[in-house]
Amino acid sequence: MTWTERVVEREGARLVCRDWGGDGPALVLLHGLAGHAGEWEALAGALSSAYRVVAVDQRGQGASDRFPSDVSRDAFVEDVVAVADQLGLERVGLVGQSLGGHTAILAAARHPELVRALVVIETDVSGPDPEWPGHIRRWLDSWPAPFPSRDAAVQFFGGGAIGRGWADGLEERGGQWWPRFDRNVMVQSVVDAAQHSFAHEWERINCPTLLILAQSSFISPARVDELMRRRVPTVSVSIRGTRHDLHLEQPDTVYDVISPFLAGLSA
């Protein structure tokens, strides 16, 4: 099934979404930092037979406004609300990876009337972590952008499905391939999360929750145990042979985990 571009405007920010249509329950998909809605292509296509699937280019990234005035955690959360409201989505399931999962957790905690289910992939809400912005700055500075070719970008990002997924987020200009975001905006986007702990938000969630982890996860087993103790009921699944971007690496396996979880929910 193909998707249709939708545009959502909120307080001067233009958000571009990919809408796969459908008459089933709504799912909103949120990518991680420096990502794009196209990361969900394989998973969204598989889910769209049973759900209304919408993937969002979050503010500052992809086809959405590159220089939003506000990149606080509150702004990202309220974008989710605006997408649901303007696209006519009720009682949505939220699926988020990495920082997109962080946004999904906050949205579920603060807007329980909107969120019927939560799926978070490689996500934690512990903190604060004052070193996080510097880590993101060094990571982005390591990119040899612009890339001379798409193939060069694929190889830089590790090759395979993960490399292709990251390369798909670039744009071609003048025969070179450039990121579709501003480095300083990306760094600023994690400052709020780096300065505060949002652990209490996890405990406020009252909808069914699925936590999906990579085998090589940045979240320690002890931290996973703590998350499970502090937020019941939560189902936790680790997918063998995967890394942080497991939604790119093994989308079929992620679908096989998500699908029965969503199908088991009451309407």
Image (spheres, rainbow, N blue to C red):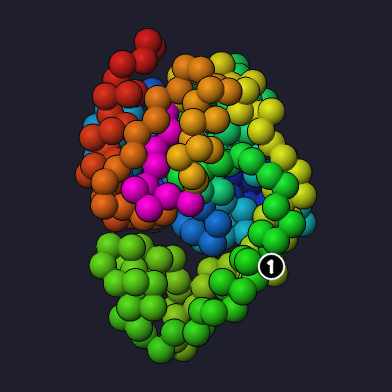
* Above or below for 17 versus 120: below
Q: Is residue 72 visible?
A: no
Furthest residue to the front?
A: 222
Looking at the image, residue 212 sits to the left or right of residue 225; the answer is left
Residue 249 position within the rendered picture, expressed as x and y whole percent measured from the top left: 29, 55
Q: Quadrant of the N terminus?
A: top left
**In magenta stretch: residue 214:** yes
Nearest to the observer: residue 36 or residue 228: 228
Looking at the image, residue 142 sits to the left or right of residue 260; the answer is right
* Above or below for 155 versus 217: below
Residue 80 position within the rendered picture, expressed as x and y whole percent measured from the top left: 59, 37
* Above or below for 245 versus 30: below
Quarter of the rendering containing residue 69: bottom right
Looking at the image, residue 36 sits to the left or right of residue 186; the answer is left
Query: Does dot 1 land on a helix, a strand or a loop?
Result: helix
Find the magenta span and give its range.
210-218
The residue at the point 29 percent across, 20 percent down is: 263
Q: Which residue is mark 1?
A: 134
Residue 254 position within the rendered picture, expressed as x and y whole percent measured from the top left: 29, 41
Q: Is residue 46 visible?
A: yes
The three-letter amino acid code for the residue at tag 1 is: Gly
Quarter of the rendering containing residue 95: top left
The residue at the point 40 percent across, 25 percent down is: 235
